[in-house]
Every structure is written in structure tokens, then in C-alpha cells.
Image: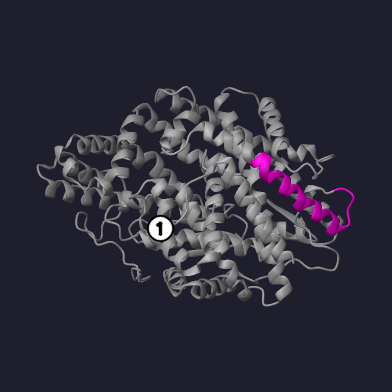
């Protein structure tokens, strides 16, 4: 097994000056012009040209990432928002025509045949795809869309509620939904949703703008709808729309009934006649919600220990990020919702953003984003930036597998055996209960983009129909229908990264397969895990899964088999 070091180094610049910073388009234009006119009349010159192009790409990518990171950390800072908007509107639109020209220059070179075809296959396949999709009219539209999508975080980042005289972000308020006091849960649930309702119109208006512009992008590129365009743009070479639709049906057939069993157990545990949405995370009378940490610092310290115990290298990666101040973990007002790991193409060590509030879910999120971070570390030494732009189905396999691998190390968070058992049971329940929601969001997106020009009423009706199709039947929404109708607005992916959601379902199946292998041979599975992550995108998606020691398979048979496996594991945990 290869020896890995977490002492990640910023890429050495050979094409751009070390002190170069992006301030405007003119500061970048010279380098694009040089690459556009440079002679590449041999394999050696082509490889040098590729390295220089990659270096420029890494510098631009990291600059854009930092603008977005800073803005999401403080959505109320107009200066940070303006810096991000400036990049989207005044720099990136100038880059796109040059990027297209460079792609065409590359594909026109006779020397690409002399490159290692196995290593470059996926990269060149993506270049061909990008050339096919490029259209001048979409440059300005894409810039508008990048800016518009960030308005979601600005709107939702301002949301807060007052509970017992104290202000809480919606992420912080979610802790109250775990309490055994049902009256308190209902009160908080109502407050949170009434606060969301205040911005329903603003979010609907924002979404209308996003839908309209996305549809126009698809038309400009020669597609009938944005769904078909996006499938191609995302590089979904290994599965189709029909495969996704079949996956939805498999989830409904094999997983939703198990999730209903989970909630029936919850209903009996709580001693309720009817289970409501504000009951699903509640603890029984006399049992307090799990409190695995008090603050972000403690979460990070314990996470480093857990990762180190799994493999010292894993902990070293988080320590390196801490040394570089690459974490923003705690929830606060003015911070965008959600959590992410942002790869930084030049520096190498990524940035983890979270809204931690001291819950068991936060531990899982940290394990998840930590898995993404390992992916960034393990693929950093690949020679081209494009090699590190791994497919999302693989990125989520890295993160979701780490959630399950890390469970053996959770005593650091839960020294009490009973609490540890509870946390593990919740993780296994989550591993299955996430599937119906994934199917709901993905099927809703298929409807949204194949029905352009729909009204708000039609959108709401479609949402309710699809939500009811997959949601566990033993959760009652009676009297809460107005909250159910806006539930989709909680999902930031719909606004910010359209169609990026089915990947979670595909990867969750893969992660369960990885965990099954881990239980049979821990060290071999971790070796395969690290090796597959180190490949970046130098292999096809199916090959990457094969390198990880599993099959790329989200067929009905595999959904059934792995859901039954988890069901048996849950029995073992519950005793």
C-alpha cells in the first residue's frame, strides 16, 4: 500500500508569478492569450501546455472558491457579496470563450493520440462534452444564474426564531425538535415554519427566475428541456433518466416500507396514537437528546481523534486543515445554511463549512465532510486540475462511506454505551430514511424542468403529489398541509445546484456496500477506499467503484439486498 502524507503543499507555480492575484479580467487575459497562441507542435510541448493550462485553472478556481466561502460565512457582508458577484459578472464571462477555444485547440492537436489514453480518457471525454454544450448566448445567462443561486443563502441566512426570549437560527432551533416535551416540539416546529412562510413569496420569485434562465440555457444549447441538458453537462455517462426513474421505484418498493417500520417503532416508543412531522426526531419521556459536543472546537478535537483512530493519516489531514484555519463549524445568524467541503485546487487542503448546534446529526455531518476532505488530500498530487474534478457519485461515496466507517470510533463522542448504541441506531436509520427524500427531490426536479412555464399552484400540486408518493404513510400531515406544501424550499440544492441530488442515493448504496466489506475486512476496505479516492477522475465512474472494491450498481436487486442488510444490522444494534 502506498504511503500517504497529510503534509499537503500548495502547488508550485511555473506559469503565473507567485505573487499573482486576480483583480480583474485584464490581469488574466494575458495568460489565456498566451495559451491560445502558443505552439504545441510535439507531445512534450502539449504536455507542458496542459500543465500550464491546469495551473491557470487552479488559480482561478481557488480564487472563486474563496469568494464563495467568505460570502457564505457572512451573508450580511455586502463587500463579500460584491466580490463574489464581481467574479461571476465581470471575470468568468470573459473566461468561458477562451476556455472553449482552448478545448478546441487541444482536441485539434494530433499529439493527443500520443498521450496515455487510459489516463486521459475521462478528461478528453469531458472536453468533448464541454465543446458540444458551449454556446455564446449562455455565457451571460450562466453568470446571472451563479449570482441568483447565492440569493438563496442570503434569504435563508437571515431566518431566525425566538424561543423563550432567546434568538436561534433555524439550525439551532432544530435541537428543540429532539426534546421529549411534545408541546415544546409543536411550538418550535410551528415557529420555524411560520418564519419560513414569511419568505415563501421571495423564494418562489427567486426560483421562477432560476427556472426561466435554466430553461433558456437548455434551449440555446439545442435541448428540449433543462433536465436533458443538465444530465449531459453533469457528465452522467454511466446512467440515464430511465435508470433514475427505476431507482425511484425501487426505493418506493423496497426502502419506504422499512422506513415506515422505523417510524412505527418510533411512534410506539413515544407512546403516541399519531406521529406528526415534529415527532420524528423526538426522544422518549425521560431520555435527553444526545449531546456529543458543546461547541465547534470540541467537535473538531473529537473528530480528529476519531479519524486518527481509524487511520492516523485521516486525523493528520484534519490537523493540517486546522493549522491552516480551514474550518467554520458553528451555526450563527447571517451564515448561509447547510454544510460543505470546498476543495481548493491550488492550496490542496480544503475548507469545511457547517452549521453545528451540538447534535448527533452534526457529528454525522462532520464525518461526512471529513470524508470529502480526505478525497481532496488524496487526489491533490494528480498532475492536472481536471484529474481532481471527480464525479459527484464518487465524491459522495467518499463522504457517506466515512460516516459508516467512523461509527467504530464514536465512543469518543459517546462514552456511555447506551448513548453510543442510540447514536449508531440513528445513523443506520438515517442511512435508509434518506432514500425516500432523495427520490422525492430528484423526481420533483424531473417534473420541474420538463414542465417549463408552470404556475405556482401547479408546482405546489406536483410537489405534494410526489412527496406523498414517497413519504412514510404513518407520518400524519393533517392540519400541517400549508407547511408540507413549502417543504421543498428547505432543500438548497434545488436553488443552488440543480439535479445534484440523485448522487446521494447512488453513493449511499455504494457506501452501504463499502461498509459491508469493511465489516468483513477493515484494512483491505480502507486500502481500497484510499486508492479509489487517490485516482480522482482518471478512471470512469464504474472503474472507480471497482477500485473501491464494489460494483457501480443501483439496480432494484441491489437496493433490495443492501436494504435488507441494513435492516439486519439494525436488529443487531437494537439487540
- 504 vs 345, left or right, is right
Q: Residue at x 61, y 43 (%)?
A: 438
Q: Residues within 10 Å of mark 1 (few under 14, many from 20)?
A: many
Observer-nearest of 327 and 29? 327
Q: Residue furthest bottom?
A: 415
- 438 vs 130, left or right, is right
Place of residue 504 in the rendered image (x, y in percent of width and height, measured from the top left) = 55, 48
Q: Quadrant of the image for the N terminus?
A: bottom left
Q: Is residue 260 one of those drawn in magenta?
A: yes
Residue 97, located in which quarter of the rendered image?
A: top left
Q: Is residue 157 visible?
A: no
Place of residue 517 in the rendered image (x, y in percent of width and height, measured from the top left) = 52, 61
Tell me the residue that label 1 is attached to: 533
Q: Is residue 324 visible?
A: yes
SS class, disc 1:
helix
Observer-nearest of 532 and 521? 521
From what the image shows, is residue 350 above or below residue 392? below
Residue 237, located in which quarter of the rendered image?
A: top left
Q: Quadrant of the image for the C terminus?
A: bottom right
The residue stretch that appears in magenta:
251-274
Q: Residue at x 62, y 34 (%)?
A: 444
Residue 329, located in which quarter of the rendered image?
A: bottom right
From what the image shows, is residue 215 above or below residue 542? above
- 548 vs 420, left or right, is left
Observer-nearest of 5 and 355? 5
Magenta stretch: dominant SS?
helix
Q: Is residue 196 one of those drawn in magenta?
A: no
Q: Residue at x 77, y 50 (%)?
A: 261
- 11 vs 465, left or right, is left
From what the image shows, is residue 311 above or below residue 343? below
Observer-nearest of 344 and 475? 475
Q: Residue at x 76, y 47 (%)?
A: 260
Amino acid at each position: 500500500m502506498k504511503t500517504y502524507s497529510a503534509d499537503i503543499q500548495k502547488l508550485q507555480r511555473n506559469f503565473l508569478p507567485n505573487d499573482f492575484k486576480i483583480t480583474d479580467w485584464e490581469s488574466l487575459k494575458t495568460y489565456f492569450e498566451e495559451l491560445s497562441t502558443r505552439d504545441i507542435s510535439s507531445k512534450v510541448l502539449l504536455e507542458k501546455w496542459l500543465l500550464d493550462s491546469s495551473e491557470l485553472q487552479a488559480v482561478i478556481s481557488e480564487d472563486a472558491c474563496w469568494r464563495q466561502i467568505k460570502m457564505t460565512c457572512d451573508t450580511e457582508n455586502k463587500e463579500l457579496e460584491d466580490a463574489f458577484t464581481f467574479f461571476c459578472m465581470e471575470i468568468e464571462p470573459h473566461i468561458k470563450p477562451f476556455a472553449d477555444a482552448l478545448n478546441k485547440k487541444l482536441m485539434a492537436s494530433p499529439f493527443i493520440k500520443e498521450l496515455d489514453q487510459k489516463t486521459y480518457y475521462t478528461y478528453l471525454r469531458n472536453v468533448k462534452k464541454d465543446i458540444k454544450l458551449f454556446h455564446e448566448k449562455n455565457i451571460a445567462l450562466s453568470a446571472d444564474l451563479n449570482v441568483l443561486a447565492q440569493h438563496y443563502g442570503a434569504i435563508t441566512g437571515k431566518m431566525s426564531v425566538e424561543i423563550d426570549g432567546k434568538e436561534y437560527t433555524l439550525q439551532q432551533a432544530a435541537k428543540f425538535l429532539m426534546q421529549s416535551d411534545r408541546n415544546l416540539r409543536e411550538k418550535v416546529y410551528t415557529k420555524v415554519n411560520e418564519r419560513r412562510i414569511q419568505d415563501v413569496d421571495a423564494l418562489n420569485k427567486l426560483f421562477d427566475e432560476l427556472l426561466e434562465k435554466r430553461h433558456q440555457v437548455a434551449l440555446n444549447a439545442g435541448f428540449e428541456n433543462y433536465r436533458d441538458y443538465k444530465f449531459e453537462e453533469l457528465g452522467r455517462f454511466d446512467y440515464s433518466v430511465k435508470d433514475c426513474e427505476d431507482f425511484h421505484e425501487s426505493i418506493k418498493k423496497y426502502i419506504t416500507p422499512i422506513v415506515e417500520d422505523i417510524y412505527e417503532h418510533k411512534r410506539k416508543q413515544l407512546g403516541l396514537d399519531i406521529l406528526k412531522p415534529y415527532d420524528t426526531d423526538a426522544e422518549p419521556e425521560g431520555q435527553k437528546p444526545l449531546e456529543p459536543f458543546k461547541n465547534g472546537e470540541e467537535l473538531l478535537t473529537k473528530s480528529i481523534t476519531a479519524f486518527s483512530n481509524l487511520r492516523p493519516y485521516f486525523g493528520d489531514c484534519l490537523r493540517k486543515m486546522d493549522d491552516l484555519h480551514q474550518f467554520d463549524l458553528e451555526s450563527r445568524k447571517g451564515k448561509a445554511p447547510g454544510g460543505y467541503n470546498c476543495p481548493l485546487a491550488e492550496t490542496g487542503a480544503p475548507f469545511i463549512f457547517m452549521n453545528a448546534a451540538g447534535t448527533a446529526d452534526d457529528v454525522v455531518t462532520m464525518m461526512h465532510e471529513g470524508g470529502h476532505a480526505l478525497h481532496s488530500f488524496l487526489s491533490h498530487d494528480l498532475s492536472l486540475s481536471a484529474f481532481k474534478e471527480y464525479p459527484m457519485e464518487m465524491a459522495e461515496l467518499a463522504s457517506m462511506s466515512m460516516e459508516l466507517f467512523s461509527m467504530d470510533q464514536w465512543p469518543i463522542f459517546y462514552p456511555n454505551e447506551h448513548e453510543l448504541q442510540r447514536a449508531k441506531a440513528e445513523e443506520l436509520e438515517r442511512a435508509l430514511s434518506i432514500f425516500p427524500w432523495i427520490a422525492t427531490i430528484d423526481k420533483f426536479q424531473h417534473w420541474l424542468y420538463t414542465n417549463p412555464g408552470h404556475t405556482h399552484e401547479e408546482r405546489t400540486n406536483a410537489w405534494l403529489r410526489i412527496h406523498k408518493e414517497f413519504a412514510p404513510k404513518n407520518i400524519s400531515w393533517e392540519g400541517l398541509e400549508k407547511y408540507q406544501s413549502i417543504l421543498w424550499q428547505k432543500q438548497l440544492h434545488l436553488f443552488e445546484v440543480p439535479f445534484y441530488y440523485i448522487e446521494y442515493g447512488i453513493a449511499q448504496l455504494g457506501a452501504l456496500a463499502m461498509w459491508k466489506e469493511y465489516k468483513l475486512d477493515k484494512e483491505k476496505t480502507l486500502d481500497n477506499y484510499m486508492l479509489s479516492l487517490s485516482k480522482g477522475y482518471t478512471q470512469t465512474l464504474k472503474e472507480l467503484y471497482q477500485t473501491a472494491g464494489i460494483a457501480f450498481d443501483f439496480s432494484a436487486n441491489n437496493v433490495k439486498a443492501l436494504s435488507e442488510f441494513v435492516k439486519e444490522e439494525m436488529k443487531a444494534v437494537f439487540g
